[in-house]
Amino acid sequence: MNFGLSEERELLQRTLAAFLDNECPPQRVRELFDGERGFEPSLWKGLAELGVAGLCVPEAFGGAGLEMIDLALAAEVLGSRAFPGPFLGHSLAALAIAAAGSEAQQERWLPRLASGELVGAAAFGEAGGAWQPEQWRARAASGRLAGAKESVPGAAEAGLVVVGVEGGGLAAVETDASGVAVEAVEGVDRTRRIARLRFDDAPCELLGGDTDAGPRVRDAALVLLAADAFGVASRLVEMAVDYSKTRVQFGAPIASFQAVKHAISNMAVEIEPARGLYWYAAHAFDHIRGESERSAALAKAHLTDRALQIARDTVELHGGIGFTWECDVQIWFKRAMFDRSYLGTPALHRERCARLAGW
Amino acid sequence: MDLRYSEAYEAFRAEVKAFLAASWPLVGDEAKLAPEAQAAAFRERAIEAGYLARAIPRQYGGSEREPDVLKAQIIREEFARARAPGEAVGIGPSMLVPTLLEHGAEWQKQQFVPPTIRGAMRWCQGYSEPGSGSDLASLSTRAELVGDEWVINGQKIWTSGAQHAHHMFCLCRTEPEAPKHAGISYLLIDMKTPGIEVRPLRQMTGTADFNEVFFTDVRVPARNIVGRRGEGWLVSRSTLKHERNMIGDASRVRLMFGGLVKLARERRRDGRPAIEHPEVRQRLVEIEGQVMSHVYSGYRQLTLAARGEPPGVVGLMNKLVSTQIGHQIARLALDLLEEDGLLAPSTAARDVASIPGRSASWVTQYLWSLGTAIAGGTANIQRNVIAERGFGLPRDAAADRSAGR
């Protein structure tokens, strides 16, 4: 019985945390958050040098050949530091090609994805909240793609997009091809910029190796969002604790008032015991196939719901300053909003859980 | 990450199963004994075999095995599966025994530990008083040393099981001049001593599980003190430390959740099974998120304990988490009951202890979910503990700092 992290995995988290604390501290996050692009190539390169861009890419293609749990642990650290950049979509694109690409496709794209030189993105949702594979309507036929995708994170930086198509399958499109239009959309989470993608007879290649690829990559996305939300919420609790110890009112740190202590305890109790939900879902993704779809939905619904509530509580605890643009809390707050809405709200995934349980 | 047990542990599990197959249920004349006597007889054999009382030295009736949380977990799982009596439950084994092992005199350990861990000696806890609840250290029940006896006067309240207990471990004020935390001693009192009066308190559940206990010139041998005079507060803190070291065990809330799903299948709403109703489905899965968080959190604490690592702040949260989940489950059950939620609570003991089936027992469960939020440190006190010990927030300006914590 072992429900814990190996030394290697703890080291992975510590290494990433140390890198981000040095290279991407809150003031750097703030600059990128306020900046035009929300992305810094040298930071991405640094992460890629640590192996983050190819964690789940097989070693034969230059990746680390690790498991979903490793990717999710990385997502937690990136969430806790609100890392601005295309990690989510890139990881999903690499997973999709590793899982469902032909040998030729893998040879063409995986080495450059693993090195981070080629940035990937994943395009799922369509207008009207059509997030799920059975709702996808983009059509791929005879090597050509037609359709539109909404709220695609990281699309502006991506050279390769994995697109969910009608029937629940996946197609790969190079973004410099003809018939691909990337239109930036002003999103709430400025650490993960989004765009609308239009495909007008764009050349594409189906990823046909695994007929279950669409739902599998969707499940991977849910696990990574859950992990990100856990990291976000944990950092918010730290912010609340730190602020309450330094803010003085009535001649005492507000941390000494029970109303504040209880608020912080309640926030922590909501999130701290819940990390196992994403650990288990990530573990199930590779090792307990029969439970992987439902455990991913449960983790996404629960953790992203909790993270946004904790973000609200953290703003409230900061008082007026917490509501300003200047206060960093809003960066994590908006990241929690992304995690909660992207790929469907908690209500949608709870209903899926109920259905998958046969209720 | 691997939720399976290693081969060595699976071999241990097979040994436990074989022991249980041979030893429980009891047969022959022993099968005719009263349930409590059967449990005590079985526990004696299970201790002999090394499966119970593993942390207790042999000289005090235990089986004295190397600490191994995974073996302990396997034993719990297999004993539960076989419906065999596990470790004796209650505050005697969970609170008094570890306290005696740490602070007790030799004769106290020899006399009290063996029967308590077999479940043959029952204890109640004399802590709370009418004026001393969360501020326990303000207690005022007096014990005066007269000759070689303590003479006790005062009153305790919320004393669970006092009507069935053989003994009480009790905090009394012995040094009235000392600062409040420093004036308390920890005494062991035989409940048959003249001058003790137990009056049951009827709870909102309709049953009387706890009591008021009045002391009028109750005389207790001087040697019944645990630790030294004035150290009772520290002695009682060590009890709490043992309690806090307990790993979160989510098996009960998980069973309760299973009962809730069953209820949602059986009850109807709008002419269909309630479990098909969108609101019910949303609430069920929301609760399941909390239940599974707690389950995995328990696995993780177990893993950390097996590695000899502390659980961290989450170890302080177990009681509050299970209290909150219990409330959520009971509240949805009450909604599923519709008009049956108007029924009087069942007062049958089995309906309090087990997973509810009948409507009236869910009403009981709803009321008890409030009891667990209060007993053993209210939810608000738990929140203080998490904030102060877990996150290092300063103690409340108004709280007393005279000693101890």
Image: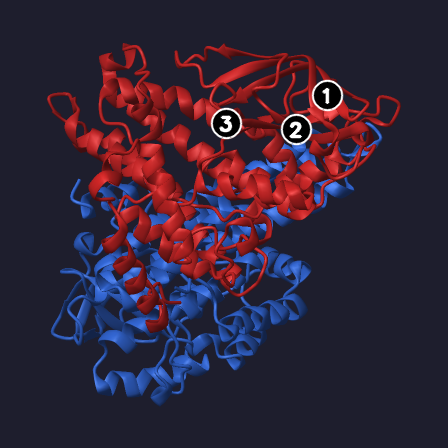
Chain colours: A blue, B red
A123 on left or right of A41: left
Q: Earlier in the sequence, mark 3 or mark 1?
A: 1
Real-space CA distance between mark 3 and mark 1, rounded to the nearest whole angstrom: 22 Å
Q: Position of residue B60 (x, y in %)?
A: 55, 49
Q: Which mark is residue B139?
A: 1
Query: On the image, numbered disc 3 is attached to which residue?
Result: B373
Q: Amino acid at mark 2?
A: Ala
- Between disc 1 and disc 2, the foreground one is 1
Any part of residue A267 in sight: no
Q: Which mark is residue A259?
A: 2
User: Are marks 3 and 1 in one subunit?
Assistant: yes
Vertical arrangement, residue A1 with respect to residue B92, above or below: below
Point out the image quarter for the N terminus of chain A. bottom left
Nearest to the observer: residue A40 or residue A274: A274
Chain of the residue under the numbered disc 2 shown in the image = A
Position of residue B278 measured from the top left corner of the image (x, y, whole percent): 23, 32
Label 3 SS? helix
Classify A346 as above or below A191: above
Q: Amino acid at mark 3?
A: Ala
Secondary structure beneath label 2: helix
Report, in whole angstroms, how far the alpha carbon at label 2 lies from the one at label 3: 18 Å
